[in-house]
Image: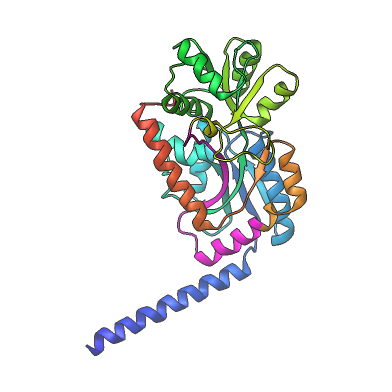
Amino acid sequence: MKTTIRSWLRGVAALALCCAAGAAAAQDYPTKPITLVVPWAPGGSTDILARVLSERLTRSLGQPVIVDNKPGASGNIGSAMVARAKPDGYTLLIGSMSTHAMNPAMMPNMPFRGVEDFTPLGLLAYVTNTMVVHPSVPANNVKELIAYARANPGKLAYASAGPGSTNHLSAVLFEKMAGVEMLHVPYKGGAPAVVDTVAGQTQLLFSAGTQTLPHVKANKLKLLAVTEAKRSPLLPNVPTVAETVPGYELAVWYGAFGPAGMPPALVTRLNAEINKVMQLPEVKAKMDAIGVETTTSTPQQFAQVLRRDADRYGKLIRDLKISAE
């Protein structure tokens, strides 16, 4: 009995020392430059977000936070690099719903697990995702679009950036929940999908407002709705799809991750620093200008969002046998 108690006390003492060491390490962190991996090419909204974040974190942390673009394989190359890194806070990632909740469900031989191989640090932003149609489509709202699609089954063509992309999944979810049948026209990227929708080669597109709103303002596309559960603060007069199709939601988020196994004290420290940046008025204004809505969360809240979306969209992808081909 005494031996058992002594063993238990030694375990408690070891745990206390470990926690104290972790807290001390978090207090001293960082002592060298930090790499912030962006798993896409420079110039996009994710890259802009990362550079805004890195500039402010450099000031607050007192060490350079260097953006490292590692594009390729739909975000998998850069994400895998972070999954394999030491969980010491010096290699971080800007990930998204697509890299962590969707890719694992539709890509064979994934180099990482979207949930288990990462430490969620905090949500950063949501992209305002829009539903737009070519002006030739005789619909000015979601209800009229559904009626038109039902009257013309399989004829309404929607563009996407390719099988399994967020705009493809948005359309598939809409088909399923609205009870319509449409024609999928995949492209090799979002830009050509937008170009052909503007040209009338395809009639419908679900895409980030950063890509569609300039064409809406030029009257080359009609904006029918946004895909988030609630109206976007950036477009308060634009209804959601869910106002016509209850329960419809596809919110595209960006978040900060580290490798799995990061010390809790370090996670708490980084979450606090990241949240401070995302709440700065100048950061909000800069991201608003490109159609990106900044947000904050605890690591636990972000983990819940990640698991929810991995389960929800993973099931949809598997049920419909969508693959990134």
Identify the image quadrant of residue 134: top right
**Residue 46 relative to residue 289: left or right:** left
Left or right of 209: which side holds 315? left
Q: Residue at x 63, y 22 (%)?
A: 191
The magenta stretch spans residue 107: no
Name which residue lies at 54% across and 61% down: 267
Q: How many marks?
A: 0
| Residue visible at 56% across and 58% down in the picture | 89
- Which quarter of the image is occupied by the N terminus? bottom left
> For the C terminus, which image quadrant?
top left
Residue 257 covered by magenta stretch: yes
> Residue reaching furthest left?
1
Locate residue 25: give its quadrant. Answer: bottom right
Residue bounds of the magenta highlight: 246-275
In the image, is residue 256 above or below residue 220?
A: below
Q: Position of residue 179 (x, y in %)?
A: 42, 22
Question: Is there any visible trace of residue 64 in the rendered image?
Answer: no
x and y percent of residue 249 in the render? 50, 36
281 lies above or below 146: below
**Side of 13 where 213 appears, left or right:** right
Measured from the top left, where is residue 128 in percent x and y? Answer: 63, 36
Q: Give above or below for 273 relative to 148.
A: below
Where residue 123 appears, x then y in whole percent? 57, 50
**Residue 89 seen by the camera:** yes
